[in-house]
Image (cartoon, rainbow, N blue to C red):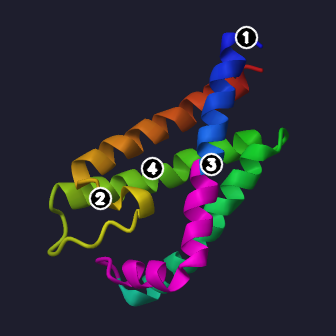
Amino acid sequence: MNLRQIIESIILWLLIVMWTYTGISKLIDFASFRGAILNQPFPNEIGEYVSLVVPIIEVALALLLIGIRTRILGFVGSVALMSVFTTYVGLVWVGSFERIPCGCAGVIERLGWQAHFILNLFVLNLAMIGIMITKRK
């Protein structure tokens, strides 16, 4: 196994574990996740939709990353979803909303918004590196 394959494997498994954990934990405690989403600064109709779709997308991304033929889609989807999450966290961090919603981030909910933003940027960059490495194969 060369260095590129090792890096790809590390990124791949970090993302698979992250998406599996976050998606399944939201589904297991759906009532809490839904309540947290409905506390966000957007209309409840959107919140209802988001609370259903996000955990399904997270689990789907993990499954896409597992498949060799679907891996690139998993990386691209990870970049897309992390871009949305990072933008939202950044907007909260800079005070774009009248009130600060809950963190809704499971294990990392104790992080401040700045640390959450930095962590999201890190994961976003990992997914982008995953795309570059996978495309070179």
The location of residue 112, given as percent across then percent down, is 23, 54
The residue to which callout 1 is attached is: 2
Mark 2 vs 4, N-terminal side = 4
Q: Distance between the residues labelled 1 and 2?
A: 37 Å
Q: How far apart are marks 1 and 3 (CA)?
A: 23 Å
| Location of residue 26 by image quarter | bottom right
The residue to which callout 4 is attached is: 83
Front: mark 2 or 4:
2
Crowd class of label 3 (few under 14; some 14 to 19; many from 20; radius 10 Å): few
Residue drawn 72% across the image and 45% down it: 65
Disc 1 on helix, strand or loop?
Answer: loop
Q: Which amino acid type is shown beneath numbered disc 1?
A: Asn
Left or right, 36 with respect to 60, comes to left
Front: mark 3 or 4:
3
Q: In this view, does 93 lie above or below 100?
A: above
The residue to which callout 2 is attached is: 110
Residue drawn 47% across the image and 34% down it: 125
Q: 100 or 22, which lies in front?
A: 22
In contact (CB < 8 Å): disc 2 and disc 4 = no
> Can residue 132 be seen by looking at this rendering?
yes
Asked whether 23 falls inside the magenta stretch, the response is: yes
Which disc number belongs to residue 131?
none
Which disc number belongs to residue 17?
3
Front: mark 1 or 3:
3
The location of residue 102, given as percent across then percent down, is 29, 72
Q: Distance between the residues labelled 3 and 4?
A: 19 Å
